[in-house]
Amino acid sequence: MTMRNIQVNLENGLEARPVALLVQEASKYESKIYIQSGDKRVNAKSIMGMMSLGLDNGEALTVSAEGADEQAAVKGIELFLSGRSA
């Protein structure tokens, strides 16, 4: 399992469109990917789960992935949430 703490760096946080794009990014990978904020942990490939987090710009979260491409998955999510990839 690969885990990384990440700070959201998206101007408007994770509103509907960025959440949809994040779910698309997560869905590119074979691995199981989870995002945890506080005591809430959701599947990064679930749009409803991701919307339920209601993450804002500057918030810290933990991304974890388990599977064949877990390192690439965590890196891809990190790039997206840091605003370096769309």
Image: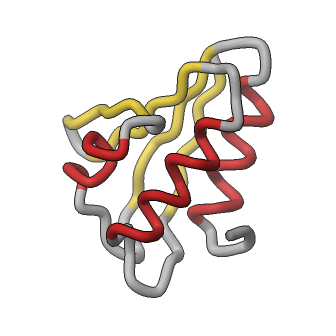
Q: Position of residue 26 (x, y in %)?
A: 59, 40
Q: Position of residue 35 (x, y in %)?
A: 42, 39
The quadrant in which residue 85 appears is bottom right
Q: Position of residue 10 (x, y in %)?
A: 50, 78
Q: Nearer the viewer, residue 6 or 48?
A: 48
| Display colour scheme | secondary structure
The quadrant in which residue 46 appears is top left
Answer above or below: position of 1 versus 7.
above
Answer above or below: position of 79 versus 53.
below
Residue at 47% x, 86% y is 11
Tell which residue pokes out farthest to the bottom in this image: 11
Q: Nearer the viewer, residue 58 or 42?
A: 42
Residue at 54% x, 60% y is 21
Answer above or below: position of 71 versus 25.
above
The quadrant in which residue 32 appears is top right
Q: Position of residue 63 (x, y in %)?
A: 51, 39
Answer above or below: position of 15 versus 51.
below
Callout count: 0
Residue at 22% x, 37% y is 40
Residue at 30% x, 32% y is 41
Q: Nearer the viewer, residue 62 or 10?
A: 10
Q: Is residue 16 left or right of residue 71?
A: left
Q: Is residue 2 left or right of residue 55?
A: right
Name the image quarter holding the C terminus.
bottom right
Name the image quarter holding the N terminus.
top right
